Image (spheres, rainbow, N blue to C red):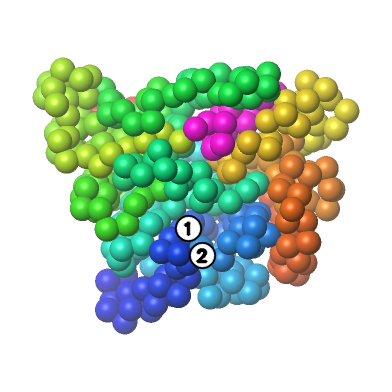
Amino acid sequence: MSTDASTASWQQAVVRSRIRSNRLILTYADGGYAPFVQNFAVGLLALRITEFVVVALDNAAWSLLGRLQLQAHAIHFGLDDASPTHRKPHAVSWYDDGYKRLMGTQPARVAAVYGYGGFDLLVADADVVWRASPWPLLYAPARAGCELQAMRGASKGSAEAFAALAAGAPPPPSPLSSPVREPHPSANCAACLNAGFLFLRGGRPAVGELLRRWSALLRQRRDEDHNQKWLNWVLATGGELRPDSAAARAAANGSAPGWAGAPVACTLDAAHFPNGALLRQLVHDAPPSCGCRGRRDCAAPRAALAPAVAAGHLNFALAAREKVCTAKAWGLWLLSADAAHRESFDVANRTELAAARRRIDGARADVGDEEGRVVAPARRGG
C-alpha cells in the first residue's frame, strides 16, 4: 500500500466525499472480479445508495470503474500490474495465489479507510448481492451496543432461521453477541464471523485496535493468506499468542479470559444476511441453467424467503460461475438480460434498476470460462 502523503490525501478526499449520514460501504476487486463489481454497484445504485467506494487493485479494475462512470467512487492503494514486469494473476478460485493476495491485503485497506475517521464502515466483498437497503437492520435499536456486526462465517444454525420463515413463523432467536472462540486459525470454523461482510462502528478504539492487530498478522504473512481466520483468531485471543501454544488454546476454548480488549461482536440474522452456504443449500446448488423456473423445490423457497433478505454473500463457491448460478437462482443477478434472474430484487426500485443497468451496458464484463476450482492449501505450521 502506498504511504505517500499526497496519495493518502487524495484517497481520503474521495472517501469523505462519498459518506452519507456518517456511513460508507467499502468493497474492492481486481479485474478477475469485474462482473461482481458491476452487479454490486448496480444493486446499490438501484437502491439509491451512493455512499460506497470501490478499491481497484489493478489497472483492469481501475479502467472498468472509469467506463462505469464510477470515478467518484474509486480509489486505489497502488495498482498491482502498473509495471509490465510486475503482473500477477487475477483471483479466480478459493485459495489460489491470486485469491490469497486479494484476501491478504484487505485488512490493511480496511484499517486505512477506517482510519480516515469517525464514520461507520460496512466492508463487503464484491460478490455480495443486494436486495434491499441493509441500514435499517444494521441500525436496529437492539444492536446499538454492537461495535462490530458480521454475517455468519459457517452454515451452522443458519438453515433453521430460513426454515422458520418458509413455514411462516418468526426465525428462532439467536444470541446477538457472544465471544468468538477459535481453537486454531481456520478459514471456516463453526463459530467464525465472515470477514466478507463486516459492519464497523466508527470512532471505537476497540475496533481500531482490532484492525491494527489484524493487518499486522497478515503483514507477517506477506499479505498472502485467508484473512478471515486471522480476524477470528484476533477476536478470540488478541492475536499476540502463537496459535499452537497452550495459552492460545486456553484463551480460545474458553478456559482463559481471551482478549479483554475485543470489540463487542454481534452475529447478523441469517434470515436477513445469508451467507453462500445457505443460499446454495436452499436452491440446491442451482441447476446447470442457473435458474429455478418451473422447479417447485427451488422456486417455492425462494419466493417465501427472498423478501427477508437484505444482502447475501456468494461465498462457499468453488468458482466464479457457481457464484453467478446461485445469484441467478435467487433472482439477484442484476446484470442478466433474463428478467427471471433479477426478479427477487426489491420491486419498488425497478425504475432505478433499469437506469442502473443501462449505465453499465456499455462496459459489461462477463464471467469467463477460465475460472479455477478450489485448491486446498498446503498444510504449514501456524
Q: Which residues are magenta?
A: 269-285
Few, some or many residues within 10 Å of mark 2 (<14, 14–19, 20+)? many
Residue 370 can be seen, yes or no: no
Dot 1 lies on which element? strand
Q: Is residue 31 magenta?
A: no
Q: Amino acid at mark 2?
A: Glu
Q: Name the residue beneath numbered marker 1.
A: 25
User: Farthest residue toward the bottom?
Assistant: 6
Dot 2 corresponds to which residue? 51
* Quarter containing the N terminus: bottom left
Question: In the image, residue 287 lies at what x, y percent?
Answer: 77, 29
Quarter residue 317 falls in:
top right
User: Vertically, is 101 above or below 275?
Assistant: below
User: Disc 2 on helix, strand or loop?
Assistant: loop
**In the rendered view of the protein, which quadrant contains the C terminus?**
top left
Q: Which mark is residue 286?
A: none
The amino acid type of the residue labelled 1 equals Ile
At a point 58% along the width and 61% down the height, the residue shown is: 49
